[in-house]
Amino acid sequence: MNSNKPYLLRALYDWINDNQLTPYVLIDANVGDMDIPRDFIEDGKIVLNISASAACDLDLSKDYISFKARFSGKSMNVYFPNHAVLAIYAKENGRGMVFPEENEEVTDADDTVFNSDIEQRVENRKEKKKDRSHLKLIK
């Protein structure tokens, strides 16, 4: 099964922009195959502004995020895989999403745990509904 992270990233990016806020991403700088400004890495992580005013030619693809930006006055092409994204949030209020650590390959066992959690929630809702009558008292 494909990761849902690229879809969530695009949706949250749109949501943050629709609310006239500034989208930032927190990146794990230790992931290989990326071009990021290494001078701004702190504790193995880097925060990047991906707003339209800061990131030119932004591409939120299924596998990676890329854009052009200026860092200390120097233009740079930035590229990193989606699985390196640890969080996306609005700078102004911190609202967004922190992603759990993700293996590059999702196993059936992980999917089963997720599905059983959903199934348990559905069963709990059914039990609560059984306690209530579906009939309304009309006077």
Image (cartoon, helix red, strand yellow):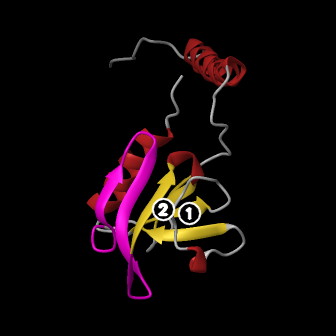
Q: Where is residue 48 in the image (x, y as percent from the top left)?
A: 48, 69
The CA distance from mark 2 to mark 1 is: 8 Å
Residue 66 placed where, x, y %?
39, 57
Q: Mark 2 points at which residue?
A: 89
Above or below, 19 against 3 in this view is: below
Q: In this view, does 62 lie to the left or right of 18?
A: right
Viewer-nearest residue: 124 or 33: 33
**Label 1 Cα crowd, 10 Å radius (few <14 / some 14-19 / many 20+):** some
Q: Is residue 52 left or right of residue 6?
A: left
Question: Which type of secondary structure does the marked residue at label 1 adopt?
Answer: strand
Circle 1 sits on which residue? 26
Task: Give, as a single range, the part of the protein colored magenta.
Answer: 52-75
Query: Between disc 2 and disc 1, whose residue precedes?
Result: 1
Q: Where is residue 128 in the image (x, y as percent from the top left)?
A: 60, 20
Q: Residue 97 carries which label?
A: none
Q: In this view, does 88 lie above or below 112?
A: below
Q: Which residue is drawn at 31% across and 59% down?
A: 58
Tell me where residue 27 sits by quadrant: bottom right
In this view of the protein, can residue 7 be seen by the observer? yes
Task: Please report contact status of discs 2 and 1: CB closer than 8 Å, yes or no.
Answer: yes
| Label 2 packing within 10 angstroms: few (<14), some (14-19), many (20+) | many
